[in-house]
Every structure is written in structure tokens, then in C-alpha cells.
Image (cartoon, grey):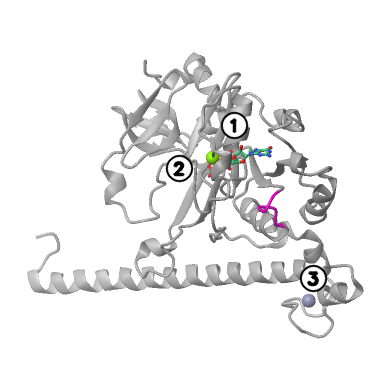
């Protein structure tokens, strides 16, 4: 059954009630353009397949194609549906993507460096999230520098991170790892858990409130799907066989799916991420390195790059032993990457402008030749 959104939406809240089970609230409702407040169906994207999207209107899940305009628009002019998006359906096809609260995105892997306009297109992992679980195994997966990169990625996407350290059963005590992460994550909650011993997992229930959406992010084999299955209380996501555990580059989960758990809790399981490529959303590395940001305020030069200028408080912190060299290196590397992205964005904007003028002059030439445009 379709959910009918009419002008009388306020008088009849029942259709939206069903959607609230999928995480819909008044903020999304008020962002609906008035021209769409007529007989339309609203649904949430729960999965992305090759040429189709899975959508759930709070009542049932079905597949939906997109309307033609998505195929004809220049990249970046229209929001393209991603898992977690709220969409307006028109005759069963996705016609519009509602403005996002936030979106976890990264540079499209494999496309960087190509000269076409899609080279700078970002890849939305998931949209409209309340929490992002950065899942990291306490095995070979554990890497503090990688956690720093995840934190920058999540902050720059406007999302709220939580660090989950899985496989705590592999150690007598996970506490030293927790301390290490806490030392670089400044107030971000850090939870050690074990799916094998079923410890620590209950603490995560606090994030999984009804109508809240949590996305799981982390390398392949970190234990994301194992967590999903734990919360679901059954095997709904395939997890890697222990015997295959050493096999590198195998992704057990291959799709990004929004899973609705009993009680309206919403989880987005993701394929493992091999490389954390940033995407320019005007962010900095500062949010994930607040102590460095604070010291930077005391550097002699306001535009200090902390790479050798005199009076650099950040380098001083390193010399004093207040700051680890590795952490400063990690910060500088992230800053370089983000600067590069910002420059690239500028360049592409220039190119867009050039192309616009090219098309204007082409039109002018046509006008001279044929007298009037449009003939
Ligand atoms: N010892 C131990 N092993 C675990 C734990 N959680 C998960 N594993 C194992 O880790 C392996 C990978 O788990 P998955 O849940 O498939 O990992 P994933 O993050 O979903 O991996 P991808 O889907 O490839 O991204 C499996 O063999 C799990 O049994 C844990 O708490 N302790
Ligand atoms: Mg998985
Ligand atoms: Zn400095």
C-alpha cells in the first residue's frame, strides 16, 4: 500500500507514523518541497543494486528504478540516491532525493586521476546517519593511524563517530588498546567487544534506539556483519568463515544494506573499506586532532604549516614529548591530502566555467550563422 502525502499531512499523521519506523521525522518532512506535497510516496533507500534501488516505505520493501532525469543530468547537479536516503516515488520510480542530514562519503575509488568529470565525484556510502561505528579488530587489523583517518573522514562528513574494538577475546585485557585509541580520539566513545564471548556488546544498545540509524565502517574482516547478526539475533548477514580469515582482499559483504531490526533500530552494514580516501567536503583534519589545532593557535605565524617555521608551537610540543611524532606525521599527511582535494575542486570549478563560456560562444556563433537561436 502506498503512503499518501497530501496537503493535509499535519491533520493526518498516520502515514508518517509508519515512516517513523524507518527513521523519518519532522525535519525531513519540512524539507519536502511544496510542489511535492501532493499524492506522492515517500520511502527510504535500503539498498543499491546494479540498476535498481531497494526502497522501504515502512510497510514493505520493493525495488524501484530512477526516473529518466537522473540519467540526463550533469554529475553533481542532482542528488543521486544512496542507501539511507529518503526519496519521493512517482509511479513506483524514484523521482527525488530529499536533502540529507549528512552523508558518509569518500573519493570514488579507482576513478581518481581520470580526466573525465566523474573523477572528482564522491561516493556516498550511506546517508542520514545518527552514528557511525568505526569497527576495528583487535587482531592484525588494529592500526591507530587508520583509526585517525576514519575519524577525520567521519567528522568531515558531518557524522558522529563511535569506535568499536572487536575481537577483545584475543587478549587478556583490551584496556591497553582502549587507552591507545582514547589518546587519539578525544572524547569519542571507545567500546571493546567480543562476539565470541558476548562481552561489551550490550553497551552498544544505547546507540541503537528506535528510529536511529547506525552505519558500520571498517576493514574487511573487522567483524561488522558479525555485530549485525548479534543485534538481529539471527544470521541475516553472511560472515566470513574462520578458515578463510587469513585470505586477504576477500569481502564477505558486498552490498550496502540498511537493515531494520526489531524495535525499529536501523543498521547499515557495509563492505570492508580497503583504502580510506578522503573527499573534499570543505573539511579539515582539525576535528580529529583537536590538541594539534589548539597548539597551532600559538604558532608565531597564523598560517604556520608546522613543517619547520620558527616559533612553531606544534613542533615544540613534539620536542617536549607532549605530542608523538607519528601523530604529527599523520596529521600533516591528512592536511596535505585535504589541501590537494580543495585545490582540485577549485581547478574543476575553473574548468566548469571555461566550458560554460565555450558553450555560450558556440551559441553566439550559431546565432550569427542562423539568425536566431533554436531554429
Ligand atoms: N575471535 C573473534 N572473532 C570474531 C569476532 N567478531 C567477528 N569475528 C570473526 O571475524 C571474521 C570476520 O567477520 P565478519 O563479520 O564477516 O567481518 P566483516 O567486517 O563483516 O567483513 P566484510 O564483510 O568482508 O567487510 C569472522 O571469521 C568472524 O567469526 C570476535 O568478537 N572475536
Ligand atoms: Mg560483512
Ligand atoms: Zn606551527
Is 141 left or right of 200, judged from the image as shown?
left
Q: Quadrant of the C terminus?
A: bottom left
Give me the residue at 63% from left, 33% from top.
227
Residue range in magenta is 139-143
Report whether residue 289 is seen: yes
The verdict on label 3 being within 8 Å of ligand 3 is yes
Categorize mark 3 by other alpha carbons within 10 Å: few (<14), some (14-19), many (20+).
many
Residue 120: percent from left, percent from top: 44, 63
Q: Nearer the viewer, residue 115 or 294?
A: 115
The verdict on label 2 being within 8 Å of ligand 1 is yes
- Pointers 3 and 2 in contact (C-beta within 8 Å): no
Give me the residue at 72% from left, 57% from top.
144
Give me the residue at 36% from left, 56% from top.
75
- Residue 228: give its label: 1
**Badge nearest the viewer, 3 or 1:** 1
Give the quarter of the image for residue 212: top right
Give me the residue at 81% from left, 47% from top.
178
Residue to which mark 3 is pinned: 296
Residue 55, placed above or below residue 242: above
Q: Nearer the viewer, residue 29 or 160?
A: 160
Q: Quadrant of the N terminus?
A: top left
The verdict on label 1 being within 8 Å of ligand 2 is yes
Amino acid at each position: 500500500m502506498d503512503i499518501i502525502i497530501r496537503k493535509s499531512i499535519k491533520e493526518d499523521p498516520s502515514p508518517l507514523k509508519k515512516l517513523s519506523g524507518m527513521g523519518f521525522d519532522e525535519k525531513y518532512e519540512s524539507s519536502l518541497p511544496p510542489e511535492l506535497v501532493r499524492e506522492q510516496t515517500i520511502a527510504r533507500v535500503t539498498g543499491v543494486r546494479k540498476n535498481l534501488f531497494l526502497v522501504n516505505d515502512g510497510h514493505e520493501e520493493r525495488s524501484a528504478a530512477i526516473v529518466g532525469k537522473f540519467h540526463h543530468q550533469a554529475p553533481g547537479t542532482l542528488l543521486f540516491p544512496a542507501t539511507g536516503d529518503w526519496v519521493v516515488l512517482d509511479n513506483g520510480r524514484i523521482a527525488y532525493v530529499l536533502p540529507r542530514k549528512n552523508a558518509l562519503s569518500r573519493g570514488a575509488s579507482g576513478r581518481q586521476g581520470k580526466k573525465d568529470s566523474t573523477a572528482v565525484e564522491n561516493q556516498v556510502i550511506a546517508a542520514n546517519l545518527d552514528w557511525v561505528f568505526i569497527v576495528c579488530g583487535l587482531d592484525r587489523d588494529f592500526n591507530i593511524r587508520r583509526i585517525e583517518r576514519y575519524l577525520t573522514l567521519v567528522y568531515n562528513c558531518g557524522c558522529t563517530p563511535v569506535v568499536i574494538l572487536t575481537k577483545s577475546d584475543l587478549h587478556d585485557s583490551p584496556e591497553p588498546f582502549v587507552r591507545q585509541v582514547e589518546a587519539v580520539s578525544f572524547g569519542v566513545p571507545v567500546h571493546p567487544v567480543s562476539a565470541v564471548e558476548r562481552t561489551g556488546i550490550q553497551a552498544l544498545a544505547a546507540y541503537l534506539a528506535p528510529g536511529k540509524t547506525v552505519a558500520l565502517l571498517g576493514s574487511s574482516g573487522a567483524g561488522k556483519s558479525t555485530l549485525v547478526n548479534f543485534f538481529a539475533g539471527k544470521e541475516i548477514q553472511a560472515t566470513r568463515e574462520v578458515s578463510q580469515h587469513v585470505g586477504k582482499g576477500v569481502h564477505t559483504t558486498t552490498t550496502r544494506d540498511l537493515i531494520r531490526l526489531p524495535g525499529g533500530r536501523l543498521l547499515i552494514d557495509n563492505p570492508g573499506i580497503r583504502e580510506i580516501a578522503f573527499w573534499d567536503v570543505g573539511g579539515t583534519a582539525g576535528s580529529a586532532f583537536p590538541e594539534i589545532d589548539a597548539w597551532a593557535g600559538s604558532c608565531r605565524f597564523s598560517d604556520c604549516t608546522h613543517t619547520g617555521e620558527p616559533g612553531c608551537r606544534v613542533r615544540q610540543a613534539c620536542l617536549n614529548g607532549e605530542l608523538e611524532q607519528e601523530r604529527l606525521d599523520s596529521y600533516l599527511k591528512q592536511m596535505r591530502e585535504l589541501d590537494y582535494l580543495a585545490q582540485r575542486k577549485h581547478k574543476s570549478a575553473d574548468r566548469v566555467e571555461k566550458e560554460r563560456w565555450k558553450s555560450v560562444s558556440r551559441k553566439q556563433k550559431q546565432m550569427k550563422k542562423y539568425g536566431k537561436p533554436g531554429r
